[in-house]
Image: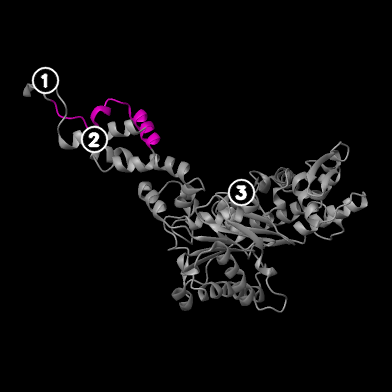
Amino acid sequence: MATLLRKLCESASLKRSGTAPNPNPNPSSERAPSPLGAFDPLPADILMQIVRLLGPKHAARLSLVSKSWRSLVSDNDLWVHFLRTHHPHSALFAETTLSSGYPLPTLAAQSSPRGSLQHVFALRERLPPSVVIDGGSGYCKFGWSKDSYPSGRFATFLEFGNVETPMYTRLRHFFGTIYNRMQVKPSSQPAVVSIPICHYDDTESAKASRQQLKEAIYVALFDMNVPAVCALNQGTLALYAAKQTSGIAVNIGFQVTSIVPILNGKVMRKVGVEVVGLGALKLTGFLRKQMQENNISFESLYTVRTLKEKLCYVAADYEAELLKDTQASFEAVEGLFTLSKERFQTGEILFQPRLAGVRAMGLHQAIALCMDHCYSAELAVNKDWYKTVVLSGGTACLPGLAERLEKELHSSLPPSISNGIKVIPPPFGVDTAWFGGTIIGSLSTFPGPWCTTKKQFRQKSKLNRIW
């Protein structure tokens, strides 16, 4: 590779200086140097493959030694390749659709990259990492925007303090703990914060509660001298992680499941956010009860949760699954555990809550209701914007859930709504919302259009952002 690069650079340098080795001293036989030196005879596609092999750093060096090479390596298709291989976390999607901040461009404006992607790549390389915090509903995840996975996890901010503890105090303790664990000064980097969507209604009291929570987040971070803050809800970040800006985000949280319609990055509260009173805690409790009824002994709820993650799944056809032998075992800390029908009956309560004694809509029914509202609202030129469903949350990682949901939605909705429905499993597992935050924190334009500074916060100039 080094030899190839040296040959390319020598070729380009000879062309730039206007000289080339010539064994014939006769001036009449001299010819003008070719635009790309010794590589000029090669077909363009072969030449581009060579530059791809060199990588972005050496390609950028070539652009400095010759106009011809500069023209070749400035091709956006080349840098699309480099963005995909060297910045794999949805970099091209992010720079095409999210770089300008909110409001997001329409789908028509997202069809092709804007500007020089070589310049975008250089900006991303120089961008320092930002702190990304997914508040979660059961567990918090935190880490750096350029990392491949979170640095750590612990309890969500709701676990700090008690019912009487003011929200600001909880958040200050929560964020302080994160920065201590990351061993970083809050004043050194901007932060991207994901908070569980809450206060679901479009009523005045719900709006006031959301505003109060948002202000408490900003105040807590700015009091810690964080230079700039971007706060977005989990549903929006889960969509971004799936390379979507519109659709329905379904987050199976710790206690409840939220079904959130989002159009061009904005939560459509007027359409209606649906909430199902089933979450990870209810599924774990249901499995525990089944194990107790079947005389399967255990000492820790952690063991039950582990068995749920390792052995449970969602059946494509519940009645047919009851007739099958579904026995499977897992070696947990407490010993070897064997489950049978419990494996799929646990996930089935998402579709039949009555099995767990819960009076609520099934998950598929709540999503279908949300889709029906989206269809009736006629909010966008693209009438299919709500037909992409993105799942997030640890329980949403149950094998078979996405396929079963898609099947139920197709069977319960009329063709005018059901045609084209696609259900996407959590793109990054339990860390999906956190990865959505890393996409924002790695943008070439970050923190500019997405963040609020302390001065801007005081001026109330950006408080009506997406929430």
Query: Can you tell which quarter of the image residue 360 is in?
Result: bottom right
Q: Secondary structure at mark 2?
A: helix
- Judge from the rendering whether residue 324 lies leftward or rightward of residue 434; answer left or right: right
Work out how far the residue at label 3 is from the one at label 1, CA to CA, in angstroms: 63 Å
Q: Amino acid at mark 1?
A: Asn
The answer to whether residue 285 is above or below residue 317 is below
Q: Report the residue marked by disc 3.
A: 428
Q: Amino acid at mark 2?
A: Ala
User: Residue 118 placed where, x, y %?
Assistant: 36, 46
In the image, 250: left or right of 130? right
| Side of 9 where 166 appears, left or right | right
Looking at the picture, which amino acid does disc 3 mark? Phe
Q: Residues within 10 Å of mark 3 (few under 14, many from 20)?
A: some
- From the image, tell me which residue sits under label 1: 24
Tell me which numbered mark, 3 or 2, is placed earlier along the sequence.
2
Mark 3–mark 2 contact, CB under 8 Å?
no
Mark 3 or 1, closer to the camera = 1
| Magenta stretch in the rendered image | 31-54
Q: Nearer the viewer, residue 408 or 461?
A: 461
